[in-house]
Image (spheres, grey):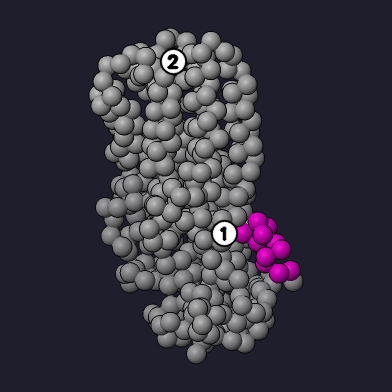
Amino acid sequence: MLQGSDLVCVRGDRRLFKNVNFTLGAGGLMQVGGPNGSGKTSLLRMLCGLSNPALGEIQWCGTPIQSLGDEYYASMTYIGHLSGTKDDLTAIENLRISSALAGVEIDEPKAREALQHMGLASREHLPVKVLSQGQRRRVALARLLVCQTTLWILDEPLAALDVSAVKLIQQLLEQHLEQGGMVVMTTHQEIEITAASITQLQLA
Amino acid sequence: MFFWIIRRDLLLAMRRRSDVFTTLFFFVIVVSLFPLSVGPEMNMLRTMAPGVVWVAALLAAMLSLGRMFSNDYLDGTLEQMLLSPQSLSLLVLGKALAHWLVTGVPLVLMAPVLGIQYDLPAEALFVLTVSLLLGTPVLSLIGAIGAALTLGLRGGGVLVSLLVLPLYIPVLIFGSGAVEANMAGLGYDAHMSLLGAFLLVSLVFAPWAAAASLRVSME
């Protein structure tokens, strides 16, 4: 269970948001909304533990995430604005290395299967720099297929994706939620996800 | 996991060989400029050789420090490393080791060849190579702290030299000192022991310090 209480985010001398409270249980989806610059990405980075809230606390299963450290990282996957892929490496190498970093070592057939599922068949051995924005995004999102984490934190996962890929991600998220996973995501696009519990968090 | 990060960085260096060669050629050219400008005065060349080679090695190691984390920072892979359930210190150690394999080892291999230009005797060439072998990993490890601290700053390249070069001084003194002692007919064991000690201390502390700096820089 992910819980945030009275979160305050300060950037420079501007306060982006205050008194953000939420509770996300198993099978729950939280959609973070708000205009540009309202602190959506800042909130997600806080939830990952990349930055600390100015005030308030984030708890994972009742313990503050700062004191959990590696244990929390083992159950969380974050895909941010930056794709986290290396331009000079091929899609398959990128996927294998990024999942090894996340603590899940996969072999080549498994990585190829995940990339094929993401619609990158026959492009696995191309360096990522020759792929389009949408295809790079698919390579980054392929990590969701191989990692076995409970909590997914996705910052604009649908940016640059085409209709079929959006549908694919939608199915992937629904499947994950059905199995008791949790998803926190921001998106500006309309996406219909059926889940047991959906929370909308609107940042002013 | 530790090997994955080394493998990754070596693979990236293989795909971008120009980065490796610029460091090596910088070292070769700087070391070769001195005999050309000073003239063929054998005795003088022999006395200045250890110092010149070592200073050139420091500067060459400095040149490539900026790239240690900045590329990973820009494409978001560093973010993923920070969120890895593996120890960040171990990851930093892997990156520093990969940096040494890519920039340090070619310098060590090239040094005896360059030493011939200075008319160094065979034994001094050997001591020079061993001192570089012990000293260059320290340069990569200490450099990792500087690179982590200046991550994402404008003009980070100059700042990193100001931060890191003073810390390189002990390595420089004992590295070139070993060769001088050997040529003066004295033992060089003490110098090597000290270089070894620097290596062990930096192996333990540098990854930890660099990991802490990365967390601060990424916030």
Asked if one can make out residue B30 in the rendered structure from this viewpoint, the answer is yes
Label disc, if present, on residue B215 of the rendered structure: 1
Disc tally is 2
Per the image, the residue denoted by label 2 is: B125
Q: Are marks 2 and 1 in contact (CB under 8 Å)?
A: no
Chain letter belonging to callout 1: B
Q: Position of residue A96 (x, y in %)?
A: 47, 46
A204 or A158, which is in the foreground?
A204
Q: Is residue A30 magenta?
A: no
Asked if one can make out residue A152 in the rendered structure from this viewpoint, the answer is no
Residue, x 42% and y 33% (percent of image)?
B55
Q: Give above or below for B59 relative to A121.
A: above
- Identity, as a three-letter code, of the amino acid under mark 2: Leu
Q: Give above or below for A40 relative to B184.
A: below
Of all residues, the one furthest to the bottom in this rendering is: A204
The boundaries of the magenta stretch are: A63-73
- Specify the quadrant of the image occupied by residue A19: bottom right
B207 or B123, which is in the foreground?
B123
Q: Earlier in the sequence, mark 2 or mark 1?
A: 2
Q: Give above or below for A22 relative to A2.
A: below
Residue, x 66% and y 74% (percent of image)?
A58
- Identity, as a three-letter code, of the amino acid under mark 1: Arg
A53 or B86, which is in the foreground?
A53
